[in-house]
Image (cartoon, rainbow, N blue to C red):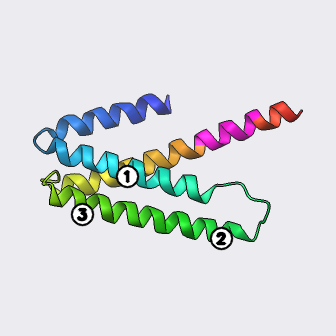
Amino acid sequence: MKFLFILLISVIAGVFSGEHFHSFMAGFGVASLAVGTAYWLAFRSTQYPQMAFLLLLTGLMAKLGVTVFGVMWGLENQVIHSPFVFALSYLFFSIVATYGYFKLREFQLSRLEAARA
């Protein structure tokens, strides 16, 4: 049900941003790539728990770097026509991608626990 709700909101937002669809898709792409990079770096498994904070900081810096690079690239190539649509799209898809990655992690951990039992 949540997936359908997210999909419905995404489609409606895409339709409403019809004139600025490139900005909408740039927000989607930059947010998804930034969150994915941060997730991949921050939640690496390690034998040293002391590295957890370092991995979280590395993930944060990677997310900021990808976001800054994506915005600069979008502005330089004139993909972002509407900063407002881009910002709303980036905010929405950052939340959605974060939710999706945490649900994926929860699913993977539950399968790992089931395999151990």
The amino acid marked with disc number 1 is Ala
Q: How far apart in space, not on screen, are marks 1 and 2 (Cα)?
A: 22 Å
The stretch of residues the image draws in magenta is 103-111
Residue 63 vertical placement versus 114 (above, below): below
Q: How far apart in space, not on screen, are marks 1 and 3 (Cα)?
A: 14 Å
Looking at the image, which residue is at 87% across and 35% down?
Answer: 116
Residue 34 vertical placement versus 7 (above, below): below
The amino acid marked with disc number 3 is Met
Main SS of the magenta part reads helix
Q: What is the x, y in percent for residue 17? A: 17, 42
| 29 sits to left or right of 60 | left
| 1 sits to left or right of 89 | right
Q: Is residue 101 magenta?
A: no
Rendered image: mark on residue 31: 1
Q: Earlier in the sequence, mark 1 or mark 3?
A: 1
Nearest to the observer: residue 58 or residue 12: 58
Binning the other alpha carbons within 10 Å of mark 1 as few (below 14), some (14 to 19) or many (20 upward) gives many
Label pair 1/2, CB-CB below 8 angstroms: no
Q: What is the x, y in percent for residue 10? A: 32, 37
Binning the other alpha carbons within 10 Å of mark 2 as few (below 14), some (14 to 19) or many (20 upward) gives few
The amino acid marked with disc number 2 is Phe
Residue under label 3: 72
Residue 79 vertical placement versus 8 (above, below): below
Q: Is residue 104 magenta?
A: yes
Q: What is the x, y in percent for residue 107? A: 66, 36
Looking at the image, which residue is at 41% across and 32% down?
Answer: 5
Rendered image: mark on residue 53: 2
| 52 sits to left or right of 34 | right
Q: Earlier in the sequence, mark 1 or mark 2?
A: 1
